[in-house]
Amino acid sequence: MAETPAGERICVAAHPRARRQIVEWRSRAALLAFLLAAGLSLRAGTPLAVACARALVAGVVTYLAVWAAAVQIWRALIVAEIRRAASESAQPPREADVVTR
C-alpha cells in the first residue's frame, strides 16, 4: 500500500479499475486453461475423470498465477498514476507515496 500526500492509503483492492480487471483476467485465464487442459487430455485419450482432474488443477494454478501477476502489474500502474498526478500538480512525489507492499 502507498499513501497519498493527503495521507490516504492506496491499495490495489480499493482501485476501481484494478479490481475489475484483475477479476476479469484471472477468471478468463482460468477458464481458458481449464478448457485447454481438458481438450488436450481428452484428445490424448485419457479417461474422463483424469482429464477433468487435470483440467481442474490447470484452472486453479492458472487462476492463482494470473492473480499474482495482475496484482503486481496493477501495483506498478498505480505507482505510475501517483507519480503522474504528482508531476501534474507540480509537487514531487514523496517516497512514501510510491512505496508498495
Image (cartoon, rainbow, N blue to C red):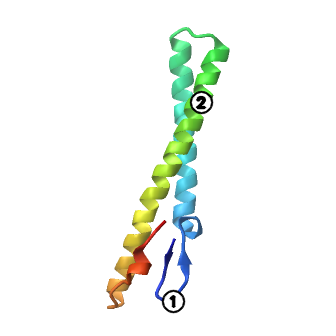
Residue at 64%, 22% in the rendered image: 52
The quadrant in which residue 72 appears is: bottom left
* Residue receiving disc 1: 6
Residue 62's label in the rendered image is none
Which percent across, then down, holds residue 76?
40, 64
* Residue lying at the far top of the rendered structure: 45
Q: Compared to 28, does 16 lie above or below? A: below
Amino acid type at circle 1 is Ala
Q: Which of marks 2 and 1 is nearer the N terminus?
A: 1
Q: Is mark 1 on a helix, strand or loop?
A: loop
Residue sitting nearer the eye, 33 or 1? 1
Amino acid type at circle 2 is Val
| Residue 80 in view, yes or no | yes
Which percent across, then down, holds residue 29?
51, 41
Q: Compared to 81, does 101 lie above or below? A: above
98 left or right of 52? left
Q: Compared to 11, does 4 lie above or below? A: below
Mark 2 residue crowding within 10 angstroms, few (<14) / some (14–19) / many (20+): some
* Residue receiving disc 2: 57
| Residue 28 in view, yes or no | no
Residue at 43%, 80% in the rendered image: 96
Residue at 58%, 45% in the rendered image: 27
Q: What element carries label 2?
A: helix
Q: Would you say the residues marked 2 and 1 are in contact, meaning their CB atoms lie under 8 Å apart?
A: no
